[in-house]
Image: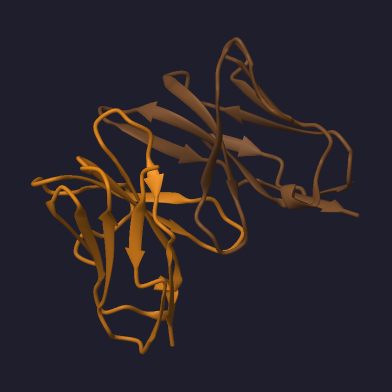
Amino acid sequence: GAVVSQHPSRVICKSGTSVKIECRSLDFQATTMFWYRQFPKKSLMLMATSNEGSKATYEQGVEKDKFLINHASLTLSTLTVTSAHPEDSSFYICSARDGGQPQHFGDGTRLSIL
Amino acid sequence: RKEVEQDPGPFNVPEGATVAFNCTYSNSASQSFFWYRQDCRKEPKLLMSVYSSGNEDGRFTAQLNRASQYISLLIRDSKLSDSATYLCVVNVNTGFQKLVFGTGTRLLVSP
């Protein structure tokens, strides 16, 4: 079945650091990738949608300068949390799909900012 | 009002019990519907799609009522391994398609 790899799975770093998370589709071409954030006991919230080669479309309330998304190839998208602060600590999950096919989720990245 | 609403639970049931989860959605333009399962600190995994005609996959039965904007999931003969959070998910087309997740219903199956 379709596999989406997300790396790293766990990050702990100091406040002010920028953190990059990678999302790769391993056996299919991901024309669209999604980035979600999930706080404890809350639902997954879509942050942004990115189509390969285009600028990401951000959901309302998500700062595009804070959460930089790059989708430069059909198999890789990156999310960079710039100058991260403790309130950015969360579970970040990517998903990918090829055209109208179902989304496949990565394993998630648990980000902890001290 | 949340776009997708679920009872957060937890539902505590013994092994072998039958348990039902409900979900309502507010966007009448919702196009497709799913139940996902999420284990603690893991990514969500697709459990099954939901169709108006109702569909069954082993011990799991899903129903959709478009008129009432209501979705259900029935689990029969619960197993310990069914303990997880069940997410009601709606695919909405707002110019492009996106998934909207409910907060999930937590199920605890005990021996």
The residue positioned 27% from the left and 30% from the top of the image is B96
Query: Which of the image's four quarters has the C terminus of chain A?
Result: bottom left
Quarter occupied by the N terminus of chain A? top left
Chain letter of the brown region? B
* Residue nearest the viewer, comparing A26 with B66: A26
Residue B29 appears in view: yes
A5, above or below B58, in the image: below
* Label total for image: 0
Colour option used: by chain
Q: Is residue A3 left or right of residue A41?
A: left
Q: Is residue A99 above or below residue A89?
A: above
Identity of the residue drawn at 63% across and 15% down: B54
In the picture, one chain is orange; tell me its letter: A
Q: Position of residue A79 (x, y in %)?
A: 25, 63
Relative side of A37 to A79, left or right:
right
**Residue B89, percent from left and from top:** 52, 35
Please report the residue visible at 20 percent of the width from the left and 56 percent of the height from the top: A76
Which residue is more in the foreground, A12 or A107? A107
Residue at coordinates 14% horizontally, 45% vertically from top-left?
Answer: A52
Q: Taking the image as drawn, is residue B1 in sight?
A: no
Q: Position of residue A91 (x, y in %)?
A: 46, 65
Please give left or right for residue B96 compared with residue B69 in the image: left
Residue B93 in which image quadrant = top left
Measured as percent of width and height from the top left, residue A100 is found at: 29, 28
